[in-house]
Amino acid sequence: MIPSPPRITKLEPNEIFCYGANTIGRHGAGAAKQALQFGAKMGADGLVGQTYGICTKDHNIKTLPLDKIREYVNEFLYEAQIRPDMVFLVTEIGCGLAGYEPRDIAPMFRGASSNVRLPQRFIEVLSCPA
């Protein structure tokens, strides 16, 4: 598995910056704020510009429960699978402002298509026997 870069500062034309978003689409901090430079739009999540927002917080900016985050991750995994021409560079979604650990979030990405690049700490979690 190829890891996503530890710091993403530029994108190739076929690369998508994947970050933790909130359901209201307010990108005020962390990787969500950084996503604005790659085409993310206020009021939106999902695939926008060269970004894909995976919701980890609700419209009140409260952390979502893991089962709800899993639903958003599953939507993302489907989107990545049907777009093999794109490379999705996933940041440590849910592990910054949302407060989860890689061991909580990484298993949601098990079985991701080969065009999904995960953070090194997610790969380490997925490499450990269950």
Image: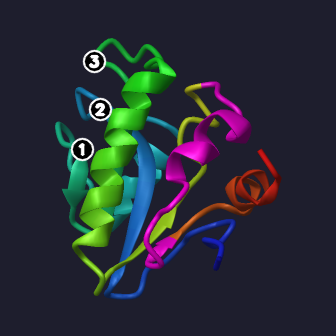
What is the three-letter code of the residue carrying label 2? Arg
Disc 2 to disc 1, C-alpha distance: 9 Å
Is residue 42 highlighted in magenta?
no
| Residue that label 2 marks | 26
Q: Which residues are magenta?
A: 99-116
Which image quarter holds the N terminus?
Answer: bottom right
What is the three-letter code of the residue carrying label 1? Asp
Precedes in sequence: disc 2 or disc 3:
2
Q: Where residue 79 appears, x then y in whole percent?
A: 25, 62
| Residue that label 1 marks | 45
Q: Where residue 5 appears, x then y in whole percent?
A: 64, 73
Q: Which mark is residue 59?
A: 3
Q: Does residue 99 appear to the left or right of 33 in the view shown?
A: right
Precedes in sequence: disc 3 or disc 1:
1
Evaluate if marks 2 and 3 touch, with contact meaning CB atoms under 8 Å apart. no
Q: Image point 33% across, 19% down: which residue?
A: 58
Toward the front, the furthest residue is: 130
Choose between 57 and 121: the one closer to the eye.
121
* Eye-nearest disc, 2 or 3: 3
